[in-house]
Amino acid sequence: MFQLDEGKPTNGTDVSDMTGIRHVSTFKKVITFLARTAHQEIHHGSKPLLTKWKGRASAFKETLLTEMKKYARRQYPFNQHLSTETAVFGWWKSLEGSEHAQILPARISFLVPGIVPNELQY
């Protein structure tokens, strides 16, 4: 879905633009969807991985955007291989609690466990 454009270098720490992300309009729609659905969980839910963001909307949005860009660019930690012993849901769950993946695994594993790691996308 979101993959690196061939031949375009990306800087792993630069998340200020959409360089290296295909389908930018779809990317933005996914970000909007994840932010809107997370809002309810942050304010009314019980999942500590998300409720910890209550009162920190700017930091949440920045972190979500950073993580989505890393996922789209196939950067760490979203470039970890899926082992034959781990199902897709387990792959996402294994990222929960990582300092480099604070939001995305919690949202994806909860909402859409069928989203596969980048290595499996064609």
Image (cartoon, helix red, strand yellow):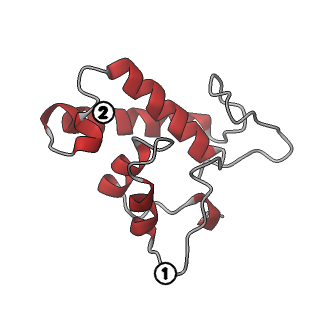
Image-quadrant location for residue 38 = top left
- In the picture of the structure, the residue carrying the numbered disc 1 is 85
Residue toward you, 97 or 40: 97
> Residue visible at 37% across and 62% down?
113
Image-quadrant location for residue 94 = bottom left
- In the picture of the structure, the residue carrying the numbered disc 2 is 36
**How far, Cα to Cα, is label 2 from label 1?**
33 Å
> Residue visible at 31% across and 21% down?
56
Q: Are marks 2 and 1 in contact (CB under 8 Å)?
A: no
Residue type at tag 2: Arg
Question: Which residue sits furthest bottom?
Answer: 85
62 in relation to 121, above or below: above
| Residue 101 visible in image | yes
Q: Position of residue 42 (x, y in %)?
A: 22, 34
- Secondary-structure class at tag 2: helix
- Secondary-structure class at tag 1: loop
Q: Position of residue 92 (x, y in %)?
A: 43, 59
Judge from the rendering whether residue 39 lies leftward or rightward of residue 29; answer left or right.
left
Q: Give neighbour class at mark 2: few <14, some 14-19, many 20+ (Cα, 10 Å).
A: few
